[in-house]
Amino acid sequence: MRADFTEDDAGKRVVNAEGDEIGILEEVERGTAYVNPDPGLTDTIKSKLGWGDTDEETYRLDADRVDSITDDEVRLGRL
């Protein structure tokens, strides 16, 4: 299990414990991850290109909520 975020995690899908997509990891800034819970296609592409920025549509994701981080997704633990 890895819950320390890196800039390489930007653009990954964020899924709940059941595997349902709930958003995209928009940006990682100084080890803090920010999730956009309802990204459009443009937001997704910008994030994958590293052009994301935090705004009123993104929310901080606490590392203690994360169950695992893979090459493709950030999986949250049960709430």
Image: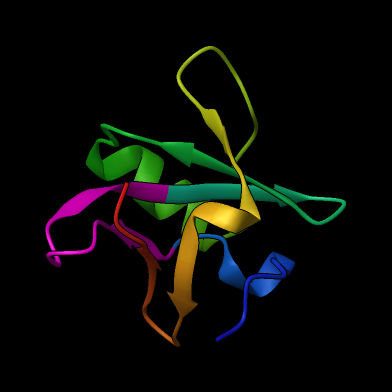
Question: Residue 73's spot in the image, x, y percent?
Answer: 37, 73
Q: How many marks?
A: 0
- Residue occupying the point 15% across, 67% down: 19
* Furthest residue toward front: 79
Q: Is residue 77 left or right of residue 11?
A: left
Type of colouring: rainbow
In the picture shown, does residue 29 fall above or below 63?
above
In the picture shown, does residue 73 fall above or below 38?
below
Let me know if residue 16 is in the magenta part: yes
* Furthest residue toward top: 56
- Residue occupying the point 32% across, 34% down: 37
> Which of the pair 60/11 is nearer the observer?
60
Magenta segment = 12-24
> Which of the pair 20/27 is nearer the observer?
20
Q: Is residue 77 left or right of residue 32?
A: left
In the picture shown, does residue 60 fall above or below 13?
above
Question: Residue 70's spot in the image, x, y percent?
Answer: 44, 85
- Residue occupying the point 72% across, 70% down: 4
Question: Residue 48's spot in the image, x, y percent?
Answer: 48, 62
Question: Which image quadrant for residue 8?
Answer: bottom right
Question: Which image quadrant for residue 40?
Answer: top left
> Which of the pair 51/11 is nearer the observer?
11
Question: Residue 1's spot in the image, x, y percent?
Answer: 55, 86
Q: Is residue 16 left or right of residue 67?
A: left
In the picture shown, does residue 39 fall above or below 69?
above
- Residue occupying the point 36% across, 62% down: 77
Let me know if residue 41 is in the magenta part: no
Question: Which image quadrant for residue 61?
Answer: top right
